[in-house]
Image (spheres, grey):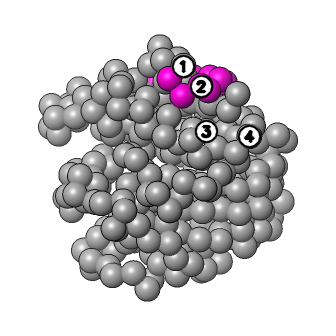
Amino acid sequence: MSETEALSGRLDDVGQIFDNETGFRRTTRPSDLPADPERLAYFRRYLADYFNDAFVPGMGAEAILAVLAEHGGPGGRVGRWLDLGAGTSTLFWSLALERVDEIHAVDVIPEALIVLDGFVRAGRVPPCYRDVMAMLGRPADHLAEMRRRMVGYMVFNALGPWPRALDPERFDLVTGFGTVGILPDAASHAACIAEIARHLAPGGRIVGTDWIRSQAFIDRDGHDNRYLDRPALERAADLAGLELLHGTRLPIRGDPLYDHILIWAFAAR
């Protein structure tokens, strides 16, 4: 995996050839899955580089956390939470929620889940996590409690039809931070939201963020996701039979790859 592919979240070497019916895996120990050493090294480096130091404001994370806290569930309380495209950061976003009964993390790249599980089991509290817990008024043991709520991991591509094995399952909250926005156009983005909606429990919520690319990154990588805006979210809500609770596009600074973020929240009607 090249640095550009990993940073951009593109799955050209995995997602496009991944078969959700034959490749779907569910585990409580991702370390038991086959792993590529190069990818493992990348995700360990990513976790150390981006989630180890003090929290950096102005990059959009505080706005995302605020929307998740407001719309993730009644009073910040959630039953079953499914985090799509989890990478290594599920527990960072968990800080916005007051209580979760079950956390399930999904990624099409098992190496990301291996590194996430290592962080879950390690017990370490990086400075950025301490900063966010203080910002949100969370108790000192909040991250430890969220670690205990991580009950399992799934390997599948959340950007297409989900594995039939998940058809009976419903979740109170489904999130996707930096996941859905790698799709090529508004129609495929809306179809993905509709697929997520099929797996919502009554009253369930969907919360996510799309990072919108800079012109320089578009020129370099070829993927243009500037179609992402509030009207696109409104059309997605209509298609999926959802209520659009929040849809805000915000500028960010200091990121060479992205100019804006689009934060969204939907509710089952």
- Height in image: 216 above or below 77? above
Residue at which label 4 appears = 202
Alpha carbons under labels 3 and 4: distance apart: 12 Å
Q: Earlier in the sequence, mark 1 or mark 4?
A: 4
Q: On residue 241, which mark appears? A: 2
Q: Mark 3 sits on what residue?
A: 206
Q: Amino acid at mark 4?
A: Pro
Q: CA distance from mark 3 to mark 1?
A: 14 Å
Distance from disc 2 to disc 4, alpha carbons, whole Å, reads 13 Å
Badge nearest the viewer, 3 or 1: 1
Quarter of the image for residue 210 reads top left
Q: Nearer the viewer, mark 2 or mark 3?
A: 2
Q: Look at label 3 and name its amino acid.
A: Ile
Neighbour tally class for label 4: few under 14, some 14-19, many 20 plus, Cα within 10 Å? few
Label 2 to label 3, Cα distance in Å?
12 Å
Q: Earlier in the sequence, mark 2 or mark 4?
A: 4
Q: Nearer the viewer, mark 3 or mark 4?
A: 4
Under mark 2, the amino acid is Gly
Q: CA distance from mark 2 to mark 1?
A: 5 Å
| Residue 251 location (% of width, % of height) | 46, 24
At horizontal 27% and vertical 77% (from top left) the residue drawn is 36
How far across and how far down the image is residue 206, in percent? 61, 38
Name the chief secondary structure element in magenta: strand
Instruction: Verify whether residue 181 appears in magenta.
Output: no
Task: Residue at the far bottom: name it.
Answer: 32
Stretch in magenta: 239-253
In the rendered image, which residue does mark 1 sit on? 238
Describe residue 63's horizontal placement relative to residue 100 as left or right. left
Q: Position of residue 248 (x, y in %)?
A: 55, 22
Which element type, helix, strand or loop, lies under badge 3?
strand
What crowding class fits label 1: few (fewer than 14 Cα within 10 Å), some (14-19), or many (20 or more)?
few
Q: Residues within 10 Å of mark 3 (few under 14, many from 20)?
A: many
